[in-house]
Image (spheres, grey):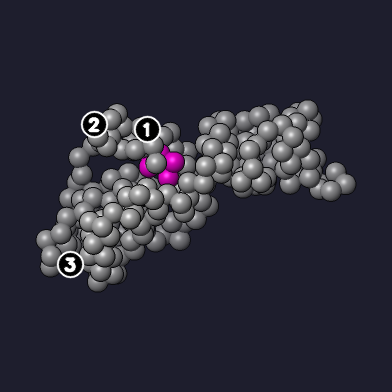
Amino acid sequence: MVTPYDLNAPHSGYTLESSRPLRFGRSRKLVTFVASRKNQVSIGCETLLEADFCIHLEYQPSVATYQSQPFTIRFSKSKTRYTPDFLATLVDGNQVVYEVKSDAGARNRNWQIRRTVLEQLFSQNDLRFECVEQCQFDHPVQIHNLRMLYHLGYDGNLARVPYMLRLLQEQPEKCASIAFLLKHGVSQADLTCALFNQQLHCHLHRPLNLLSWVW
């Protein structure tokens, strides 16, 4: 299937150019790499905020795969060039270009003008473009919990989910603490993997600990 962002396919209204590999982050800082389960490769990010966005994309069941700075797009009419922060391919086959901005960066006047131009150009070419601001995905407690669940559960196995569900169903309120599940033979890696992949649930806007409830 030819996608809107196939480098080898002809496009009307825009062209795609290969982007340079990331070697330095913003302000010449080192690139941060995120080990991606969905992509089976490490994803390079220019900022820690972009690394957190990778965790967000890993958490979203609607996202199948994603790339960091996948290409540079040149729009024919205006000669505008733009390198996306991320390109995500959804499970339904659609693709979305994401620009990730800090809350302060999103309010920058120059960016707001450029954003308006980009939104018009993407719309004219029937392409999906979304600017995602920090406040939309980077809640301090939630993103801390997601980072922890992702990294602790990276090597976990979802095959243990049925056993965990049976344990929970046997409880009077159909839920139990993390400590209870660990005590009954569930490994930390399998439990955190199940929570991150939303096979089990907990309150992510509260700090997680051994007494946190799972259902």
Q: Which residue is mark 1?
A: 33
Real-space CA distance between mark 3 and mark 2, rounded to the nearest whole angstrom: 34 Å
Q: Residues within 10 Å of mark 2 (few under 14, many from 20)?
A: few
Left or right side of 117 for 76: left
Q: Amino acid at mark 1?
A: Phe
Asked whether the residues under the numbered discs 3 and 2 touch, taking CB atoms below 8 Å apart as contact, a structural biologist would say no
Q: Which residue is mark 3?
A: 13
Label 2: element kind: helix
Q: Quadrant of the N terminus?
A: bottom left
Left or right side of 147 for 23: left
Q: Which residue is mark 2?
A: 28
Which residues, given as a range, are shown in magenta?
Answer: 50-54
Q: Nearer the viewer, residue 139 or 30?
A: 139
How many numbered marks are there?
3
Q: Earlier in the sequence, mark 3 or mark 2?
A: 3
Q: Nearer the viewer, residue 114 or 59?
A: 114
Q: Amino acid at mark 3?
A: Gly
Q: Position of residue 97 (x, y in %)?
A: 33, 56
